[in-house]
Image (cartoon, grey):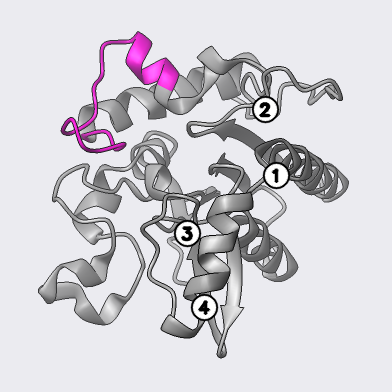
Amino acid sequence: GWRCDCCSMLIYVNGDSHSAAAEAVTPHAFAEDDPFYSGMGRRPHPDNLRASYGCVLANELFAVLDCDAESASSNARILRTTNQWLDQNSDPDALVIIQWSTWERQEWLLDGQLYQVTASGTDDVPAAYHERYKHFVATVDWRQCRDQAHEQIWQLHQRLLQQGLAHVFFNGNNHFEGLVDQRDWQGHYIGPYDSSSTFAAILGQNGFTTVNAQSWHFGARAHEFWAHFLLRYLRDNHLISG
């Protein structure tokens, strides 16, 4: 995309609805939920994206934001799209920020279309796959999903290290607390093994609540807080200069 010469940094953000800032300003998760933006599909609603922690952080750092986050995303989609972005990125100074989704979510290719599938029991898959979906919900093995996610995230971390790209990971709601096979992430992962260090937990500890009692999502002020929390973390752990 177009990039202004005055901007010295590119920030790449990926994640689920937390990073898409669903409901932060307007009560939509996807742009297509708003008739005015129906042609934008499952991308974040523009009004919400402008309030997202990624956009606030990019403004603080005079950076360009490239956001691949999508509400209801599985980690499989996050990994797939991030690796695709890495294949195409030529900016050695890019900062990669990944917020990880719940461990059980999957990405299914059904009749040529990709579906993000969760164990919530509310997903809309084609009628021909309803029984497969019911079986998935009934038999999901959370520990296996957690362990698999941990290994896949570690492999992405290794790739980012090899490519010399600054990066930081954090968990949205799930965490790896209790996992035996703990790794040294060298500051690139915010409290992966600590249930009190997720995005939702830290916001809750600092007085933020979700936009309503039925929602998992946070408002614009919470995103502003998280952007500044990330900025301090990045600087304290020498992941960016300045």
Given the image, on which type of amino acid does mark 1 rest? Cys
* Comes first in the chain, label 4 or label 1: 4
* Comes first in the chain, label 3 or label 4: 3
* Comes first in the chain, label 2 or label 3: 3
In this view, the residue in front, 113 or 58, is 113
Residue 89 sits in which quadrant? bottom right
Q: Secondary structure at mark 3?
A: loop
Which residue position is annotated with label 3?
Answer: 5
Measure the C-alpha gap from mark 2 to mark 3: 31 Å
Residue drawn at x 55%, y 90% as measured from the top left: 111
- Of badges 3 and 4, nearer the viewer stands 4
* Comes first in the chain, label 2 or label 4: 4
| Residue 68 pos. (x, y %) | 49, 60
Given the image, on which type of amino acid does mark 3 rest? Asp
Measured along the vertical axis of the image, is residue 211 above or below residue 93? above
Given the image, on which type of amino acid does mark 2 rest? Tyr
Which residue position is annotated with label 1?
Answer: 145
The question of residue 53 being in magenta is answered with no
- Horizontally, residue 52 falls left or right of residue 232, namely left
Mark 3 residue crowding within 10 angstroms, few (<14) / some (14–19) / many (20+): few
Residue drawn at x 37%, y 51% as measured from the top left: 20
Measure the C-alpha gap from mark 1 to mark 2: 19 Å
Measure the C-alpha gap from mark 3 to mark 4: 49 Å
In this view, the residue in front, 95 or 77, is 77
